[in-house]
């Protein structure tokens, strides 16, 4: 590209090239260490992870809060990618809240076990081994409004969320109960691009690959003690700074390196753990002994996934009436092109329908057995054209998807 002064500069490739993904570079990044001096408000640094003691800090002190948020943002962004907030829900203050919440979760689990034959899925582990509550946020509110209010009134939660996402965010949550013998997850990166198949992920330019991690904050609140043998979450500190990581985490050499070098910290009931969704991580294996009488030690966590409020369109678009009006014309053009989805029709589908199936209701629309995500509006429309659906059928399928996606 020529510049006004006569010089020029190369136009860089917008996509990551597969050959640019190098394990040696990744190893170098992950060999960094955490300097306690950088995180002066942390009570300690263990296994490269800063640990903050909530019982010695005041979240309502504005000067202290500002300094804490600076440290947390640094840790998530360019530091180890993870920090612990000990006593975020300290039992001395939140004992009733934690007990009531755990009881509510157990009632939800038992109700769903009795009323559904569908095995709960997991994006990164074998289904059916553990107990899971999708959208524990909404279900908690319905089951026990009082403990729900107390739980999400925690000022620490607001402080942590704002440190990474700013003042506009949306909380979602999922409960995971891992039983003795529950296997570890495969190491991965998380939502958004972590939920895309590798070929789909590779189509996103590097600017979006880097942006994805800034749209979500991952967290977990320990709803039981989590000794190391119970399998608390495993992390590879600093791995979130590897730019091509959303394409690399599926590779066997990267997974092998993770297994040999991950770190994990034990947690106590009420501790909070927060991390950048791009840090390589995986829930660990519960190696605690199973006791026949009570099923053994169950590792319990409420997994928090907090999203930026900025990833939304300016206006609301309803795809269903648009497709209803245009379907006959779409089918005509599809047939005219030889019953193939040509470039023009593909461009139209991309313009009028949502290619992203989230947010959704994962109870009613779980990930496909061989996939990471449920079907999107675009995929339904493509399938309808290829299978020769009439207007009524495609409209009904889109309406059903919309209804099934509701909370």
Image (cartoon, rainbow, N blue to C red):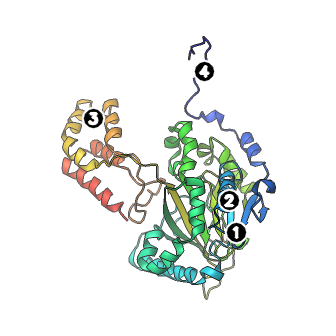
Residue 345 lies, with reference to residue 136, above or below; the image says above
The answer to whether mark 3 and mark 1 are in CB contact below 8 A is no
Q: How far apart are labels 1 and 4 at the CA level?
A: 50 Å
- Give the residue pinned by disc 2: 68
Relative to 256, say whether 293 is above or below: below
Residue at the spot 69% in from the left edge and 64% down from the top edge: 84
Element carrying mark 4? loop
For the question of whether residue 56 can be seen, the reply is: yes
N-term mark: 4 or 2:
4
* Label 3 sits on residue: 339
- Residue 24 x, y percent position in the rendering: 75, 40
Residues at circles 2 and 3 in contact by the CB criterion of under 8 Å: no
Secondary structure of the residue carrying tag 2 is helix
- Tag 4 residue: 10
Is the residue under label 4 in contact with that under label 3 (CB below 8 Å)? no
* Residue 385 on image: x %, y %: 27, 42
370, 138: nearer the viewer: 138
Mark 4 crowd level (few <14, some 14–19, many ≥20, 10 Å Cα)? few
The disc placed on residue 57 is 1
Query: Residue 396, position in %: x, y?
Result: 24, 55
The nearer-to-camera label among 3 and 4 is: 4
């Amino acid at each position: 590209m020529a510049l006004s002064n006569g010089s020029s500069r190369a136009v860089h490739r917008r996509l990551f090239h597969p050959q640019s993904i190098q394990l040696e570079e990744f190893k170098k990044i992950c060999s960094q260490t955490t300097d306690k001096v950088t995180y002066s408000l942390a009570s300690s640094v263990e296994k490269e992870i800063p640990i903050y003691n909530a019982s010695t800090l005041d979240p309502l002190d504005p000067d202290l809060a500002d300094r804490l948020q600076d440290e947390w943002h640094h840790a998530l962004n360019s530091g180890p990618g993870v920090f612990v907030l000990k006593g975020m829900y300290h039992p001395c203050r939140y004992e009733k809240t934690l007990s009531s919440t755990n009881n509510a979760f157990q009632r939800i689990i038992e109700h769903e076990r009795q009323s559904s034959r569908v095995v709960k899925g997991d994006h990164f582990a074998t289904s059916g081994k553990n107990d899971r509550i999708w959208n524990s946020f909404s279900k908690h509110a319905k089951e026990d409004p009082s403990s729900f209010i107390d739980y999400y009134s925690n000022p620490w939660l607001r402080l942590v969320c704002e440190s990474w996402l700013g003042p506009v965010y949306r909380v979602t949550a999922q409960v995971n109960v891992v039983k003795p013998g529950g296997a570890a997850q495969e190491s991965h990166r998380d939502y958004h691009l972590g939920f895309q198949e590798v070929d789909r992920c590779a189509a996103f330019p590097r600017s979006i690959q880097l942006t994805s991690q800034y749209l979500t904050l991952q967290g977990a609140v320990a709803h039981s003690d989590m000794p190391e043998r119970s399998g608390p979450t495993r992390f590879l500190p600093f791995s979130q700074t590897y730019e091509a990581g959303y394409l690399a985490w599926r590779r066997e050499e990267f997974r092998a390196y993770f297994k040999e070098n991950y770190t994990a910290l034990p947690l106590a009931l009420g501790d909070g753990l927060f991390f950048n969704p791009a840090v390589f991580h995986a829930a660990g294996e519960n190696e605690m002994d199973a006791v026949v009488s009570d099923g053994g030690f169950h590792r319990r966590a409420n997994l928090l996934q907090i999203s930026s409020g900025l990833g939304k369109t300016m206006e609301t678009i309803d795809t269903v009436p648009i497709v209803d009006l245009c379907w006959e014309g779409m089918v005509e053009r599809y047939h005219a092109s030889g019953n193939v989805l040509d470039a023009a029709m593909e461009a139209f589908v991309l313009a009028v329908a949502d290619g992203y199936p989230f947010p959704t209701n994962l109870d009613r629309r779980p990930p496909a057995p061989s996939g990471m995500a449920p079907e999107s509006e675009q995929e339904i429309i493509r399938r309808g054209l290829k299978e020769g659906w009439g207007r009524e059928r495609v409209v009904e399928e889109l309406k059903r998807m919309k209804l099934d996606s509701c909370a």
